[in-house]
Amino acid sequence: MQRRKFLQLSTLIAPLLATKNAFSFSGTGVTKPIVISTWAPNVKANAEAWKTLSSGGRALDAVEAGVKIPEADPDDTSVGYGGLPDRDGIVTLDACIMDEFANIGSVMALENIMHPISVARLVMEKTPHVQLAGDGALQFALSMGFEKINLLTPGSEKAWKEWLKTSKYDPNRTNEEINKRIKNDEKHLPYPWPVAMNHDTIGMLAMDVNGNLSGACTTSGMAFKMRGRVGDSPIIGAGLFVDNEIGAATSTGVGEEVVRMCGSHTVVELMRQGYSPEIACRKAVERIVKLRGNKIKGIQVGFLALNKKGEFGGYSLEKGFNYAIQTNAGSKVYDGKYIKP
Ligand code: SD4
């Protein structure tokens, strides 16, 4: 995000952070409608989703409309247009959507389309399948009337060219090499991920006035990833999961760590066991730590969850994760709790 834009946004967000007690729940015991998104800048996405929710619209329509805001924002380098490209300089997008009936749709490694979330929704509604990838996803999008555009903005191209100077990312590192590094006590070295990890993938969860849940997740994935790499974000159960009886969850951060433990599904199942959204997210993060130990040094993963009562919570591995909420009581940004100091 450009510095000036970030500063403008900080001015917008600062009062929200400061008024901790100003955000209260309704007296019914259930807060609805409600929309919640990963990362503070997505207050803007929530505001768009709120237009649908506050007028009695469906959560599914709200989340689609909401996440289209960062998808179209050239200054958001983690999502849609302006997203940072793969190591070959090509922007490839991942997105998925899930509604209250467990209808699902997703696109993976989609190129040249501004709104992958809308293509994912059409995969859900107009095809007998649930996932389309690569050129097939593009052809489907074009057949549905989407316009082909160049997603690489001058800013993202510049960042990619800058990154090329060092290409600090070793996608060829294998598990064997990671284990060797740990054995040699080279834990201070970063795990083999791009140094410039972009952090603003949007996972959005909403409950409408009828108490129905839906979610959407959309991203350009890890910056400077290997060509063809797909993360957690378009994978139902990993980057997003909705169970209309229980709640919904989404994730952000290094997708590889989320995929291996079916992150969002895990969070929802923990809520089914009776845990609050925050504790469910914490337990999912703890599971990653247990599974991966010091292989995840320096890695960020954050989970966000919403239950049927309209309670919400988030938790991450590292400091720095935050999320944005909107209800009838207003808009607010929360700093997520985290495991590591
Ligand atoms: C991915 N989870 O592709 C995404 C990246 C992300 O904020 O969340 N960035 O692995």
Image (cartoon, rainbow, N blue to C red):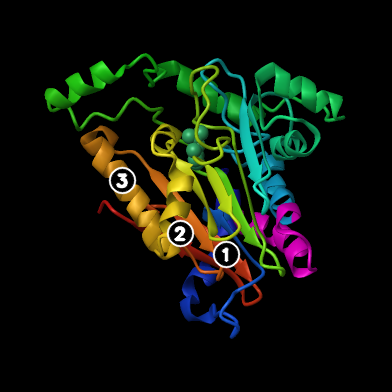
Locate the N terminus and report the quarter of the image it occupies: top right
- Mark 1, Cα crowd under 10 Å, few <14 / some 14-19 / many 20+, is many
Q: Is mark 3 within 8 Å of ligand 1?
A: no
Determine which of the numbered discs, if any, sits on residue 287 in the image.
3
Q: Residue at x 48, y 73 (%)?
A: 18
Residue holding disc 1: 325
Q: Nearer the viewer, residue 162 or 320?
A: 320
* Frontmost residue, 295 versus 268: 268
Dot in front, 2 or 1: 2
Distance (Cα) linking label 3 and label 1:
26 Å
Mark 2 = which residue? Answer: 272
User: In the image, which residues are magenta?
Assistant: 42-61
Picture quadrant of residue 97: top right
Regarding mark 2 in the picture, which secondary structure is present there? helix
Quadrant, the C terminus? bottom left
What's under tag 2, amino acid-wise?
Arg
Label 3 crowd (10 A; few <14 / some 14-19 / many >=20): some
Marks counted in the figure total 3
Amino acid type, mark 3: Arg
**Label 2 C-beta lies within 8 Å of the nearest ligand 1 atom:** no
> Marks 3 and 2, how far apart in space?
17 Å
**Secondary structure of the residue carrying numbered label 3:** helix
- Specify which label sits upstream in the sequence, 2 or 1: 2
**Percent of width and height locating residue 131:** 65, 29
Q: At x 34% / y 38%, what residue is drawn? A: 299
Q: Nearer the viewer, residue 3 or 46?
A: 46
